[in-house]
């Protein structure tokens, strides 16, 4: 039994209030306006002194930066950050029971090359990025980029370890189906989500079932492969 | 949760609403897949064949001869262990097989006995369909929890008091499912549609008695395929909301809204009948919800699929308010498609009605619109039949001329065909 913060009723369901329908789990507000994604975010005002771009990912930097905004490279040590620990539950995070499925996040050279020929020449491919498995928990896992200022941490956070700037903040979400498998829904992303190498993006807002080994491409270089965990 | 069939539900919608907007639309695709054969034992199955044995079936006698052959074939196809009976209907109704009037258990012996009786059908007397439905109801009522299917074949209009007919349909509603077939051109589509709409079946025309055998066969095959009894859609909508409609939109259009049975203040159930282990149906739901503030997310409907007491699958219809017009003005492709298919069915039925009343201007506008919608959605089956009733000048603009003379059979085929839809064309990858 959960008490609904919107109408105060006791709800037998814990996803949405069974009286007024208000969302009960804390989900981030939908990102209506995704940042124009062709290039990494411009530096904030006041304009700091520009410096050489990041040697790893090519993101713009200033002399004030100790770490690269794009890939997190420590300019002093030249080290890339370790894969960030999964954010805490809530805010589209990995709350809930393990589902027996894992999303493997990696950088896809072929996809990147295809995009660059589309005119994304200012982007760099992140060399040497290791595949990162993200176990899928709960009923919904948001795919996007985090916003510290909004306290928004998607379950599959593509701002780390190397930010894919062409991913919308709330880009897509993976939804658990009644039969235990997962489906994907593109949440009105700017640059689209592509299934299994298709040239046509998924329809915005349409739920598409995912099967073992299905590949999603999004942003400028990201590939997410859905795999079933070994029993 | 393990049930006789694995059901899944997928929701297609644009959940984004403009500030102040309240109408939420979604298409829910329900699929029964795989597991139907495996797993739990199938429920009991009862199949009734109800054949018109009125005098008109002898005129021309090709009808009764075709009915003998087709009914005998169907009796021979009854799957082992199913319960069945052969009913002959005129202004009186008789259970022809088994003579006891109780259902027979299908096996080698009973199949042969029933087929032999079917081969001797003769016509005589009038047509009182209410008595046929009442007999079928009495025989099937004891099969609580089983799959109960009937196939009703007639060649003429019902010659009895309209109230009596409707009361019999009401009594049968929820007891069994019934498909209806009209052979020839002397029956009324609207009359049989009343039966099939209430009893979760389909009405079709058999234009030529020679097609009867195939149609009985197809019915038996579908009946054999049904493995899950009494599937219902349970829909919750929030306090203060109004359910505008719940409509099956594929494979055929059927408005479920009037069939709602309240479960509680916010929840109602809609019957969908028995399912095969490998079928897929689409539903369009439309709900008016109390308006939210920009940024609010609310559940607009929780749609669960019920088998017996269990929810075997569910889909969530959401509403998210935004001030971004680019999001809120988008119409989901599935919702747009099925809105068009529903309009197509309505345009055909209204066009045919206008033509019947001699209002050719209205008929031209309605049937022209139907041609345009059928072309847009790639509904080739309906387009083929439409072309028998109108001359098409331009599919895209819906410019048509209503034919001066139309075969009555073609007009009736178009009427029965009007509710048949196609699924959304998928973009090629």
Image (cartoon, grey):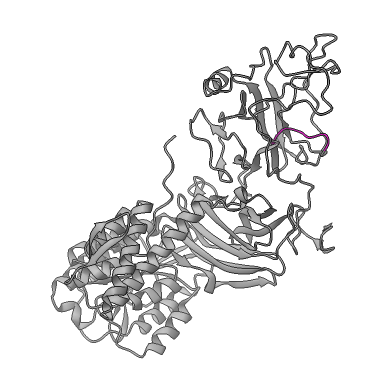
Residue closer to the observer: B256 or A196: A196
- Would residue B102 be visible to someone looking at this image? no
- B152 above or below A88? below
- Residue B326 is left or right of residue B181, and the answer is right
Total labels drawn: 0
- Quadrant that contains the N terminus of chain A: bottom right
| A148 drawn magenta | yes
- The residue closer to the viewer here, A172 or B276, is A172
> Residue B365, position in %: x, y?
32, 68
Q: Residue furthest top?
A: A77
Residue beneath the point at 61% across and 48% down:
B327
Answer with the quarter of the image where residue A138 lies: top right
Q: Quadrant of residue A145?
A: top right
Say whether residue B382 is magenta: no
Which quadrant: the C terminus of chain A?
Answer: top right
In the image, the segment drawn in magenta is A143-149
Q: Residue furthest bottom?
A: B161
x, y percent for residue B346: 39, 68
In percent of the image, x 26 and y 70: which residue is there? B412
Judged by its main secondary structure, the magenta piece is loop
- The picture quadrant where one finds residue B58 is bottom left
Residue B178, horizontal then vertical, whole percent = 40, 70
Q: Position of residue A170 (x, y in %)?
A: 69, 39
Q: Residue at x 55, y 67 (%)?
A: B245
Q: Is residue B356 above or below residue A227?
A: below
In front: B107, or B394? B394
Q: Nearer the viewer, residue B372 or B280?
A: B372
Q: Is residue B88 visible?
A: yes
């Amino acid at each position: 039994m959960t008490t609904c913060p919107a109408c105060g009723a006791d709800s037998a369901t814990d996803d949405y209030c069974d009286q007024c329908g208000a969302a009960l789990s804390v989900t981030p507000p939908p990102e209506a306006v995704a940042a124009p994604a062709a290039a990494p975010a411009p530096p904030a005002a006041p304009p700091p002194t520009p410096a050489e771009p990041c040697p790893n990912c090519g993101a713009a930097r200033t002399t004030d930066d100790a770490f690269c905004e794009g890939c997190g490279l420590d300019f002093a040590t030249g080290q890339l950050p370790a894969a960030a620990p999964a954010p805490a539950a809530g805010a589209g995070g990995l709350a809930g029971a393990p589902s027996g499925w894992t999303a493997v996040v990696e950088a896809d050279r072929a996809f990147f090359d295809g995009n660059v020929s589309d005119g994304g020449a200012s982007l760099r491919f992140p060399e040497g990025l290791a595949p990162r498995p993200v176990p899928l928990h709960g009923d919904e896992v948001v795919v996007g980029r985090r916003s510290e200022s909004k306290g928004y941490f998607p379950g599959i956070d593509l701002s780390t370890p190397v930010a894919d700037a062409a991913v919308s903040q709330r880009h897509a979400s993976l939804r658990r189906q009644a039969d235990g498998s997962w489906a994907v829904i593109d949440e009105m992303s700017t640059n689209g989500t592509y299934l299994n190498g298709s040239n046509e993006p998924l329809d915005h807002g349409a739920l598409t079932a995912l099967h073992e080994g299905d590949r999603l491409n999004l942003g400028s270089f990201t590939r997410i492969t859905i795999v079933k965990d070994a029993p | 949760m393990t049930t006789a069939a694995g059901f899944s539900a997928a929701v297609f919608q644009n959940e984004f609403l403009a500030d102040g907007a309240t109408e939420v639309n979604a298409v829910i695709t329900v699929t029964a897949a795989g597991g139907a054969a495996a797993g739990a034992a199938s429920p009991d199955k009862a199949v009734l064949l109800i054949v018109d044995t009125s005098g008109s079936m002898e005129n021309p006698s090709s009808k009764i001869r075709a009915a003998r052959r087709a009914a005998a074939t169907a009796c021979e196809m009854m799957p082992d262990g199913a319960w069945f009976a052969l009913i002959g209907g005129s202004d009186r109704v008789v259970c022809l097989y088994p003579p006891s009037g109780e259902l027979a258990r299908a096996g080698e012996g009973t199949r042969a006995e029933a087929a032999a009786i079917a081969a001797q059908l003769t016509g005589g007397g009038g047509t009182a369909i209410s008595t046929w439905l009442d007999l079928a109801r009495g025989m099937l009522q004891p099969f609580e929890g089983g799959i109960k299917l009937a196939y009703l074949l007639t060649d003429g209009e019902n010659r009895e008091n309209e109230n009596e007919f409707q009361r019999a349909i009401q009594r049968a509603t929820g007891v069994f499912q019934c498909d209806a077939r009209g052979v020839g051109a002397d029956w009324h589509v609207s009359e049989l549609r009343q039966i099939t709409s209430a009893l979760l079946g389909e009405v079709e025309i058999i234009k030529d008695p020679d097609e009867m055998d195939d149609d009985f066969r197809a019915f038996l095959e579908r009946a054999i395929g049904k493995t899950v009894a009494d599937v219902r859609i349970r829909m919750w909508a929030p306090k203060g909301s109004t359910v505008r409609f719940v409509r099956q939109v594929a494979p055929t259009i059927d408005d479920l809204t009037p069939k709602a049975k309240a479960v509680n203040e916010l929840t109602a159930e809609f019957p969908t009948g028995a399912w095969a282990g490998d079928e897929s149906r689409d539903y369009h739901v439309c709900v008016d919800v109390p308006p939210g503030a920009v940024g609010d997310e609310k559940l607009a409907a929780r749609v669960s699929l019920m088998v017996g007491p269990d929810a075997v699958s569910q889909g969530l219809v959401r509403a998210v308010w935004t001030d971004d017009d680019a999001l809120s003005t988008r119409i989901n492709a599935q919702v747009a498609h099925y809105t068009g298919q529903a309009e197509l069915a309505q345009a055909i039925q209204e066009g045919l009605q206008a033509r019947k009343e001699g209002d050719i201007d209205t008929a031209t506008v309605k049937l022209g619109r139907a041609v345009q919608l059928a072309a847009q959605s790639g509904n080739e089956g309906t387009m083929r039949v439409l072309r028998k009733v109108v001359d098409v000048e331009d599919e895209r603009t819906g410019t048509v001329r209503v034919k001066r003379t139309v075969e009555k059979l073609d007009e009736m085929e178009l009427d029965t065909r009007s509710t048949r839809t196609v699924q959304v064309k998928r973009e090629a990858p």
